[in-house]
Image (spheres, coloured by chain):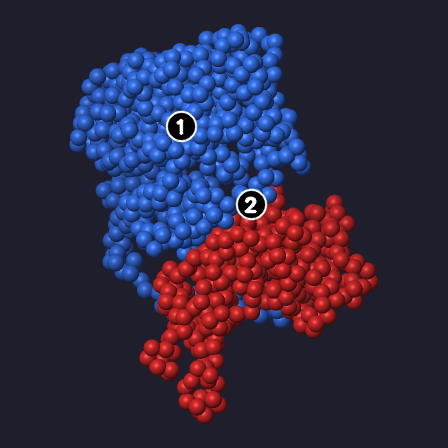
Amino acid sequence: MADTDALITRDAAEAALFGTRDGTCLFAPIRHHSPACAWMLRAMIDDHQPELILIEAPRDLIHHVPFLTDPETVAPVAIVSLGAREGQSTRAVRYFPFSDHSPELLAIRQAAQIGADVQFIDLPAGRHFDDDVKIAPFQSEIAFDTATFVRATCSKLGLRDGAELWDHLFETRLGQSDWRGFFSDVYAYCLALRETTAPDIIVHDDTLTREAEMRAHIAAAQGKRVIVLTGGFHTPALIQPGDEKPAKSSDVESYLIGYGEEALDALSGYGAGLRYPGWYAGLWQSACAANGSPDWSAHALETSLGFAAQMAGDNRRVAVPQLVEMLGMAEGLARLKGREAILLPDLFDGLRSALIKTEAGPGEPFSQRLHAYLRGTKLGKVPKSAGQPPIVADARARAQTARVDLSDSIKRAKKLDIRRKPTHLKTSQFFYQMGLLNTGFASLETGPDFVIGSRIDLLFEEWLVGWSPFVEGALIDAARLGATLPEAAANHLFEQRQALFEAGRGNDLSAILDLLLAGLRAGLGSDLTELADEMRNSVSIAADFDALAQIIQKLQSVSAPGDPLFDENAPDLVAILTTAFDRMVYLIEDLTETTEDAMPDRIASLGIVAAVLRGPQADRFDGQTFTDALTRILAIKDCPPMLAGALAGLLVRAGLYAPETLAHLLQGNLRGIGSAPEDRAALLMGLLSVAPMVLWQNQVVLDSANAAISELDEDIFVAALPSLRRSLTQLNPHETDRLAEELAALFGVQASSISGVKSRFTEQEAARALAIDRAMDDLLIADGLTHWKAF
Amino acid sequence: MADGENSVLRAAAETIYADQLAALAANDTGPRPDGWHLTPRAVRRFIIGDQTLGIDAKFVGDDALVDRCIVSLMGRQGLMLVGEPGTAKSLLSELLAAAISGRSTAVIQGSAGIIEDHLRYGWNYALLLAEGPSARAMVPSPVLSAMQSGQIVRVEELTRCAPEVQDVLISLMSEKTITVPELGSDYELRAKPGFNVIGTANLRDRGVHDMSSALKRRFNFETVHPIADAGFEKALVARQLSERMAEHAQAEMPQSDVLDLLVTVFRDLRFGKLEDGTTVSSPKAVMSTAETVNVAHAATLDATYLDSGAVSGRHIARQLQGVVFKDDPEDARKLRGYVDLVARDRARKSAVWKDFFDAAKVGLSRSDTDK
């Protein structure tokens, strides 16, 4: 719109807001969380002394109102409502936040003081869950940033964006007393917003249905002294009476929870109020303390000093002259824009000019920290009587036991000595339980991962831990799973197990093993009986050789006292172990049928089980059956050479097979008359993958291998070389070294003389020679003499 | 434009915009810092533009930056403009000086050859020999003259001066005083209100010196970024081009689609990214807006005098190689990659791009055979 001046006059705005219905019903157009609106509203309530205050909030959340005025309640708090449950997916969660400077909360508190009724008049919360949004605020204020009118006015006044414009026009009036003038101006502003907002945004947002609902409630309050408190964007649509009927109420699960400044701001992405709640909370307190306009300069000074103190805490001291310059800049910028009040953009710009002494851009340490500082980290509290699902109280109590600070939302590092301190192990289990429920409460930064088996040599776990409203939201969502945290976490595991069945992966042993280990890691051993029984059943019919080996390896270590996952209350893991072992022995018979591609994996699994049998507590297995099975298939005529090498190696190690026979086998395979070159090394490959030490522990094996290779015809040797080399890559550096020593002894040379051969050239000389070579090439190409390159 | 101005290639900002400055001064009420010719808000209007007074925008894209610069200059800190080459740092500093002091010609053009005397004072040696040291024999530097008249002095490319020369500014900026020991132990020249320093510097180029942190503390730093908005950049190029072509009345200005092509090529190569996010390799050569104007200028001259008719894609292609890709052979390769991949694709859909693509191919193959 080109000329917004003609849209409405202040008199007309006053008449619209305060002049209908014989002046009994006043409309207060507000912006959510705006301190100035809250301030003016207080004056309005004082003057008008309403019997009833109607508030734009979901109707079915009204029962939380008494708790909002409870003296134990500390803002910010939020009403959280949960969407309908559909299967096992996480439910949609919506938050309706209140801060001390929310006009809504102020109205509720004032109403309690003067004995007025409060009524919520928006659509029931249950009606809000039509879309796929999982976490969303109820109040959308997108128009405050996007309307064409906002952009045009910004460029006219030399302001940056909608946020600055709102602050410049309205928040600067915090502490003044002319509420009629103020709300008339807000009304005119919002009217212009509405006129210049694209209609599809209004429709998309469900705005029209909600406004019809609100009109119906306003009509129902006819005759009383009323104040109608809604977002200014809606006010223009509410003043004219309508004849709509209220929508049917729906039943919605909702709770009052402590909310946080950080979350209040996090939601501002879609505009639930103002950004930087910490800053506005400070302004509100200044105004309350002054009982009038806050001292803007003093507030800016205090903010800067607080910021500097926090920076000093981070070892980034801000020098006093720079701080003075920052404030001076902020004040100068405010004056340049024609206002007394120092607002947020002024502070940010002051910081940018005064503190950043190089090119501004990503990586400078100041802006992000000022953002975080102004956002604030305060967490609110609700009285116990407000009624939380028991799981929230349970988790809070456990967090307190684990010495987690619940008064703010800062994430702090926590280091746990899980192997030596039982209390630390308990804390770790608590963190993992919270992790199972996806609360976002604690994240493991470094530490052993026993489920996937990575870095299990680490002694300590380092976590990043912080309570937040979203943790509570997730817990409330999980409340259906149990009254205590362990119960809910265990039930969550069963749900996942169920999901495996439904996905047709009911016998996926690796996935089940992961669940079991995750449960043990979270200290849920006593709840895992059912899972363990199911697992045992799956194991007894399993066909996945490698998964069985994994189970044997992992459960063997877990079932040893002293292991961090050991749990004396856990179900009988040994039963699973022995079942898995028996099943594996049974499956060994099929190994000769294995395809060539899968063979290395199978051999590795054999190696794993053999290692378990050599380890502690191997007596719980009947090792004899294992070696018998190995012997049996080794004796089969067409046992594939790679498998034969591995079997023979394992058996030689166990002292059940004569090294001479192995030497014989090896020699035969290496000579391999008529066999393809890559097959000649197959047996060696199998041997080296599970039992390389056989080569140097049994001279006869090494000798015969050496003899066989020496005898090879030069051409055949060269053809077989790649596969021979590949077989040797299985050795680790120590083993390679060891083998080299043995071979050197065999040839009567010093091992050191092999590795110590000095090149005649230094590295630099070689590099130079290469460079010259390339340059020569270029010259030859340039001169058209490429055919010389052959020489 | 008056006739007298045509006798120089480029007049100072206060001369070019004399009428605008006068119009602003005529309507200028409100508090004004000591020594300033205009109020801070009028300075802002002069640079950002004000349609009601018929003042065009001279620096676009970052109004908040202009605000910060103006407020910085009201305080005791100097103003240091940093950023990539060709982001109109000097233009901004000239506009600020012209609006605040009514004079933008107190300038030191930083280079390795600058010595301390250029920042403090020198001597008229004939007088010095004849009379001995006297105030009359002193030759003030631009800094000293700006101090004495309470004006803004501009130090261009400060980081190209040797560190010991930069150091002169340190005490000068904190004391706002220059002592002249030759004229007596107490002889000092003190700055009048309105004096301040605007520096420009390039922190990334090779061949520049670091700034000491003592000096950095005396400046507020402002980073001037390349123009973010393609539309703004196009308008700016068009305006600067028409200024440059003012004396070539017969020249035909490039059509909108040709300017689009030019600005797009420069932006693609500057940011190393196409509009759709595809990455292209960015050449080492400076792909600034200033260079864009240079290419537009050269292409228009080419079309007007060496070819017949309007500027087209082929003129852009021809000038691009000469004006921008001056020495680094790697850059030629990157341009070839851009032409082969991006321009070829666009040539299928647009006649201007096809013209550009064909000429660029010819030009690139010629430069290959030259080697």
In this structure image, what is the colour of chain A?
blue
Percent from the top left, x then y, of residue A176?
44, 32
Labels 1, 2: one chain: yes
Asked if A237 appears above or below B295 in the picture, the reply is above
Residue at 46% in and 57% down? B74
Q: Quadrant of the C terminus of chain A?
A: bottom right
Which of the 4 quarters of the picture holds residue B218?
bottom left
Comparing A282 with B324, the one in front is: A282
Comparing A581 with A224, the one in front is: A224
Using the image, name the chain to which the residue with label 2 belongs. A
Q: Quadrant of the N terminus of chain A?
A: top right
Residue at 25% in and 22% down? A398
Q: Secondary structure at mark 1?
A: loop
Q: Secondary structure at mark 2?
A: loop
Which of the 4 quarters of the picture holds residue A598?
top left
Residue at 61% in and 22% down? A203
Percent from the top left, x then y, of residue B273?
58, 48
The amino acid on which the numbered mark 2 sits, given as a three-letter code, is Gly
Percent from the top left, x then y, of residue B316?
71, 59
The amino acid on which the numbered mark 1 sits, given as a three-letter code, is His
Q: Residue furthest right?
A: B308
Q: Tell me the residue that label 2 is attached to.
A: A158
Instruction: Label the red chain with its letter.
Output: B
Q: Tell me the residue that label 1 is attached to.
A: A101
- Whole-angstrom CA distance, mark 1 to mark 2, is 28 Å
> Could one spot residue A372 in this view of the protein?
no
Residue at 36% in and 16% down? A113
Crowding near the residue tagged with mark 1, few <14, some 14–19, many ≥20 C-alpha atoms within 10 Å: many
